[in-house]
Amino acid sequence: MELTHVKRVLGNRAVSGSSCSVICALCLSFVVAGCKSGSYAPPPDTSAPTAPASLTAAVVSDTQINLAWMASTDNVGVTGYMVERCTGVSCSNFAQISTPAGTTFSDMGLATSTFYSYRVRTTDAANNLSAYSSTASASTPAPPDTTPPTAPANLTSTAASASQINLAWTASTDNVGVTGYRVERCQGAGCSNFAQIAAPAGTTFSDTGLTASTSYSYRVRATDAANNLSAYSSTASASTPAPPDTTPPTAPANLTATAASASQINLAWTASTDNVGVTGYRVERCQGAGCSNFAQIAAPTGTTFSDTGLTASTSYSYRVRATDAANNLSAYSNTASASTPAPPDTTPPTAPTNLTASAATDTRINLSWTASTDNVGVTGYLVERCQGAGCSNFAQIATPAATTFNDAGLTASTSYSYRVRATDAAGNLSSYSSTGTASTAAGPISVAITPVRGGATFSQSLNFTANLQNDVGAAGVTWTASGGTFSSQGNTAATFVAPNAAGNVAVTATSVADATKSATATLAVTDLTGVTTYHNDLSRDGANTHEFALTTSSVKTATFGKLFSCSVDGAIYAQPLWVANLTIGTTIHNVIVVATQHDSVYAFDADSNANPCVPLWHANLIDSAHGGTAGEGSVASSSRGLVGAGFGDITPETGVTGTPVIDLSTNTLYVVSKSAIANPPSFFQRLHALNLTNGNEKTGSPIAIDNSISVPGTGDGMVNGRVAFDPRNEHQRPGLALVNGVVYVAWASHEDHDPYHGWIIGYNATTLAQVPGAVFNTTPNHVGTVSYSRGGIWMGGGAPAADSSGNLYFLTGNGTFDADSGGSNYGDSTMKLSTAAGLSVADWFTPADQASLDGADTDHGSGGAAILVDQPTSPVQHLVIGGGKEGNLFLLNRDAMGHYGASANPVNSKAVQIFNVGNGIFSTSAFWNNSLYIAPAGGPLQAYPFITTTGIFNPGLATSAAVSFGFPGATPSISASSATTDGIVWAVDSRTYCTPQSPGCGPAVLHAFDATKLSTELWNSFPVTSDRAGFAVKFTVPTVANGKVYIGTRGNDTGTGTSSILGELDVYGLKPN
């Protein structure tokens, strides 16, 4: 065959190597068969591949088995494999499941816990099938166990020794089976840092190698084969005991033995000491001089022992050793010996005879008697006495050694009976003598008067009583007075009417039977007509210079204290107000008025100590008679209340906070109430004008204070170019001011809760109509990029001050400021408003660091403004002073206040004076006798002298009290008989004011100091329990009038509003006797 023909047959396939023989054979067959290149067809492939070998089946998961085998061979070529499967042990119903091209196959999606068998055969391009491989089988496992065991129960821990604690618990259960437990431990009482320490298979474990005297806590959880962990058991704790005590106590020392009687010897020794503790002693005894055969007779726990039942006239020796809880025995004490005396004397003396009783004076009776005899000897006598004719209740009064006795200190004109018996050294008592009786002579007359001290207003009536001793025939007394008159007089009682002149009056009761015997009471008459506004007057100087009863000598524990209390329906934040000689009904009273956070006003008799204290009248400002609507109540203001930011600064409610003001010319009390309907929330503020004699609303009263009041502006809360008053967020904390027939009311907020502004609004005192133009907003416009406005008038509850021209002075708190650039925002400023035509800014001062004050909430206006008494001879005649949280006091010229301090050179130099008092100021200072009194938060009460020749204070000469006042400090009040005499500073420490931010809840403490020497504290209300006040409220101000001091409290309420006394007026004064 030619090569070209071979090429044609093979299609030009390359020929090389081993393929040559095949080609040659083909060529030969072509020649033999006579084939031709255009019609040749190869013979069919009928050779099957070899069977796959080494088939394996491997379980991969509970739903997958992987197969693998050795490749088959074929004469032409293997094209693939056919995998067959059957299910079940010994199964034979194989079915093809796959035709992989390779020698592996993953059978997925299988059933769990199932037995599978596999076989494989091979195929080629001619579909020749090989024989089957061997069969391979495998079982899918059960699905993974994810169910944890139950938690071990009833875990107990028991200390087995000083180094071992045994644990036991109830076994857990599991869907498959619990394989063991994991024990965790932490050390120390209340510990929580558990760490695993063991993994026992059973339900007990002994934890060894522990530290003695140590608390350990344990918890256990179970595990199963799948490592599922149960929840923890309960925690069990146990403490290892102390290690065994092997140290004996020290030996008892200083053993003494003392014969107490013929049958008793008393032992005493110095206590032993022990590393753990002595539990007792073992007393051993032997009998006879020089004896040594000691035997234990007792085991006392103390260091004394009385050995009784002994033989008289016998020597006994003793020794003692100590024992402890581990039964360690000490060495023996020294040996002590004693001998019992002869048997006791049991023979009593003979009875005294010839007892006589003779009256020597009106207070003494002399006794005498004949001596007794005794077998050993009489050692003395026992005298007994009873009082009254025919008495028999004798009681021993004396033990004289002789046969006479003088009984002194007796009551005049009284019968006494006596009897006497003798005693000897053995304590044997004789029979009684006969009874001797005598009567004391009549004594001298004595007179006492009640009350012995007190205060009175002009024409006030007071009842006096005389108490006489030895007034034979009840002749009584005559009544005289150094001033005033008596409206009635009796033998022992009189009604005195005070004169219409201030000063001290003496009221005297003189015995009719003996004109040399008398008693005198001192009555201080005041010309004070009232404390009708916050801190006494529009200057807010806090001084009552019409007080004659309270002096530095009369205010002391012996003569001054709490007189009575009056319960009210809520906490009293406002200062109590006092009015003299007010006619209520047909009776004239001195009246004290208080307002509560429960929206009530009460009037009480200022001098009555009735129990319970009964109001002269009570007005609830939110009932229908006082303008309230259905469903109104005081505003919930706790941490979950309706107002504020959730701090609960005033807890639990807000009603009346600002101090009212009284117009005595019309007998009208002005007060602002705040109330709410909770659902849906709606809020009300109203100005009330109450008839001071009955609490009824006057014509036109009340008037609503609501969002109909607005000013032009762009400030926080602006709507349509106006900023409206918000009766919810605005809080009427400052006291009210009555100036030239206008009632001025000021506001800040609840807890800096935005949006709010400082407001001051004037109302006609007669009609309650809003005075035209008398609306002032401290921060009406936005400033820069800040979102808030603020500038509240806080002043720690202080009221705006006013000068003789009617200008108002007050301080503002943190807020926006732009007055220096022509704006109308006055945050952190001292303000002077003209009232000549509505309200307008007349002058102002703002500290140079206003921006930082605002940013840090360090209000300039946390304290109140006070006008100093005008100084006609000083360089600056008209001054105002005030300060805030930085502790700086600013003394300003009211006629040129200085505007923005940063604009001055140096800064703040236009202020007359600036000095720091050491702590933040949240109060209004007091001014008296050219001294300024201030009690900053956390600091002492201080006095700064004002130097009239320089027109400034001299801080270098400041004095202070030894007592510090907690937050928020105190607003002091001054009582004095003049501008320079009898000055007392009164201040209340209210640090435990019972709200969430208070350090505690406790009584307010009223303090009294000598105003000329603050280091002398005259008195305070805490040491004597009966003097203690109710629980404190912030910003309490004491009111001093007519010999009494009045303070408001929250009673026994801790701030929940659920106690028995929700508010209380406490009244202090001179004790009547």
Image: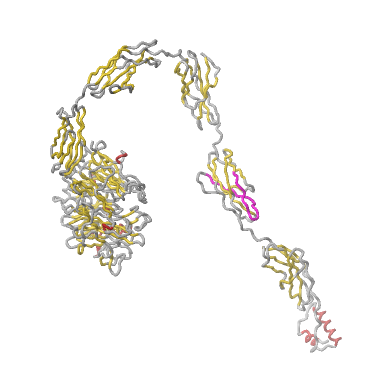
* Residue pictured at 55% horizontal, 38% vertical: 241
Give the dominant element type of the magenta stretch: helix, strand or loop: strand
Residue 756: image x %, image y %?
A: 30, 61
User: Observer-nearest residue: 363 or 60?
Assistant: 363
Residue 470: image x %, image y %?
A: 20, 27
Q: How is the image coloured?
A: secondary structure
* Residue pictured at 28% horizontal, 23% vertical: 388
Residue 907: image x %, image y %?
A: 25, 57
Q: Is residue 186 left or right of residue 533?
A: right
Residue 1007: image x %, image y %?
A: 27, 42
Corner quadrant of residue 819: bottom left
User: Observer-nearest residue: 528 or 789?
Assistant: 528
* Residue pictured at 61% horizontal, 57% vertical: 147
In the rendered view of the protein, which quadrant contains the C terminus? top left
Residue furthest to the front: 390
* Residue pictured at 14% horizontal, 40% vertical: 487
User: Observer-nearest residue: 466 or 849?
Assistant: 466
In the rendered view of the protein, which quadrant contains the N terminus? bottom right
Q: Is residue 1023 magenta?
A: no
Q: Is residue 179 magenta?
A: yes
Q: How many marks?
A: 0
In the image, residue 297 above or below residue 370: below
In the image, residue 574 above or below residue 21: above
Res 123 seen here: yes
Res 863 seen here: no
Q: Which residues are magenta?
A: 167-187
